Image (cartoon, rainbow, N blue to C red):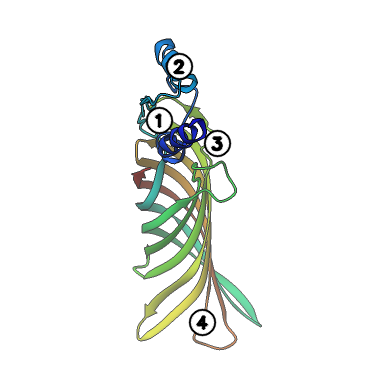
Amino acid sequence: MKPILLFFITVGMMPHLFAADNIWSQDTQTLSSQESEQAFKSYTQEHDITLKFADDIVIKEASDIEDNILTVGVSLGYGTSTETVSNTTGSYDLDHTLGVAKVIIGKDFTFFHEEYTQPVRIYLTYAYTLLSEGVDYSTITIGIKENMRYWPLYKTNKYIIYPTLSYEIGNSSLKRASTKISGLTSEFRGGVNYARGHFEYGLEIAYNSIAWDHPIDGIKDESVGLQLHLCLNYRWMHDE
């Protein structure tokens, strides 16, 4: 009788032992002294008894972890550039002032940083540049940006100010008369971000270079420029 009683007690406890949400922990309520005494007497006197085990109270807590789904932004810049045209006999420089409007779309990742911090941004850009001479061109790039929130310049419970560094590479294209010209473009950026909520307000200095494919063989055409940019980004987040 005793082995049979132990078998049924064990079987009766199995749902509690293997249930995903109902497990024993430091918060599990023990049997009262009366229930313990009844169980002991039932075992020694070989009487059946029904034991009721109280489950732990499941406490649900809201997580403060957020995952970046998408980041969208715009950047407006103003600056200067110098275009150098050269061949085997010599070279000359052309100085320009310019304005730049850029659209940004990307996503933030953690990579080798602390889990869930997501300071690394991979993004695509489309930029429109207008030179002082009335010449305009467009640029498409892919970039990587380090948002150094882990080195804050100033931080409160509501906002944070931190430095940023980024690099972009892509292609620029323009049309002069009936001729289309393209060029390999690279750009370095450094600045500071003021982040509040899901918004980022940035001030950045950009240095870029373009190696134009000149339509005439033997002529090298390169541009380098420096601009100051105002940036606004919105981080679309998902609560874990």
- Circles 1 and 4, Cβ within 8 Å, touching? The answer is no
> What residue sits 38% from the left and 41% below the top?
201
Q: Which mark is residue 159?
A: 1
The amino acid on which the numbered mark 4 sits, given as a three-letter code, is His
Residue that mark 2 sits on: 41
- First along the sequence among labels 1 and 4: 1
Q: Is residue 227 above or below residue 197?
A: below
Frontmost residue, 53 versus 92: 53
Q: Nearer the viewer, residue 75 or 132?
A: 75
Q: Determine the secondary structure under disc 3.
A: loop
Q: Are marks 1 and 3 in contact (CB under 8 Å)?
A: no
* Rendered-image quadrant of the C terminus: top left
- Tell me which residue sits at (47%, 46%) in the image: 204
The answer to which of marks 1 and 2 sits earlier in the sequence is 2
Q: Disc 4 vs disc 3: Cβ atoms closer than 8 Å?
A: no
Mark 4 / mark 2, whichever is N-terminal: 2
Residue denoted by label 3: 150
For the residue carrying disc 1, how many other residues have a C-alpha within 10 Å: few (<14), some (14-19), or many (20+)? few
Question: Residue 43 got which mark?
Answer: none
Residue 229 visible in this rendered orientation of the protein? yes
Q: Amino acid at mark 1?
A: Tyr
- How crowded is the residue under tag 2: few (<14 C-alpha within 10 Å), some, or many (20+)? some
Q: Which residue is mark 4?
A: 214
Query: Looking at the image, which residue is at 60% across and 86% down?
Result: 218
Residue 101 in sight from this viewpoint: no
Is 103 placed above or below 66 here?
Answer: below
Circle nearer the viewer, 2 or 3: 2
